[in-house]
Amino acid sequence: MTSQLRELYQEVILDHSRKPRNFGPLEGATAQADGHNPLCGDRATVFIHVDGDTVTDVKFQGAGCSISTASASMMTEAIKGRSRAEVEALFSRFHALVTRDGAAGDGEPDPALGKLAVFSGVWEFPVRVKCASLPWHTLKAALDGDGHSVSTEVSESSSGDAGGHAR
């Protein structure tokens, strides 16, 4: 990644962190879930409104580091108006991106990620992977409607990036 591209990505992340989009509670949400990263203190609640099979609205609230807040903000923009299947596919692509499982053969992010590609360098900082993925795992818990809270630290034997349910 060129230094100019890295700087642009940093600017986008800082913009979404300082001025998060879709921040606040969602009146009439059909589901919600809470997430927590005890290592850096990130907390997020994701609210969704699903009509049929479409996520018609999504918002989040909470407090966290720049990466976590920007990830939540950009996630809400990316999934609004998408079907459940499209959201789950985007979740998988994003997860692959931040864990470095998702680079194309040339090392470039999956084009289907669009603006979310700004998180392509996160994999270089393992602690930040949990920050970036927490809102996404919290979204998945809301979509699954299981009512569990999500935590990045389920147990010492867990090496996941935020996919565990709090116990």
Image (cartoon, helix red, strand yellow):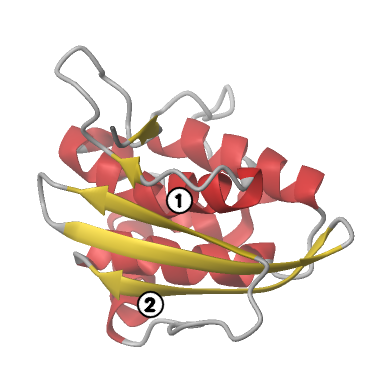
Q: Please, what secondary structure does the residue beneath circle 1 have?
A: helix
Q: Quadrant of residue 6?
A: bottom left
Amino acid beneath label 2: His
Residue plotted at (39% across, 45% down): 133
Question: Which numbered marker is on residue 160?
Answer: none
**Which residue is painted at 62% across and 67% down in the image?**
48
The crowd level at tag 2 (other Cα within 10 Å; few <14, some 14-19, many 20+) is some
Where, quadrant-wise, is the C terminus in this rendering?
A: top left
Neighbours of disc 1 within 10 Å: few (<14), some (14-19), many (20+): many
Location of the N terminus (image quadrant)? top left
Residues 100 and 19: in front is 19
Q: Is residue 164 above or below residue 44?
A: above
x, y percent for residue 142: 56, 53
Q: Amino acid at mark 1?
A: Thr
Residue 97, image x, y percentages: 47, 37
**Can residue 2 be seen from the camera position used here?**
no
- The image shows residue 64, relative to residue 126, as above or below, that is below
Q: Which residue is mark 2?
A: 16
Q: Report which quarter residue 10 is drawn in.
A: bottom left
- Tally the marks: 2
In the figure, is residue 135 to the left or right of 30? Answer: left
Towards the viewer: 103 or 49: 49
**Tag 1 residue:** 138
Kindly give the residue lying farthest to the top in the view shown: 157
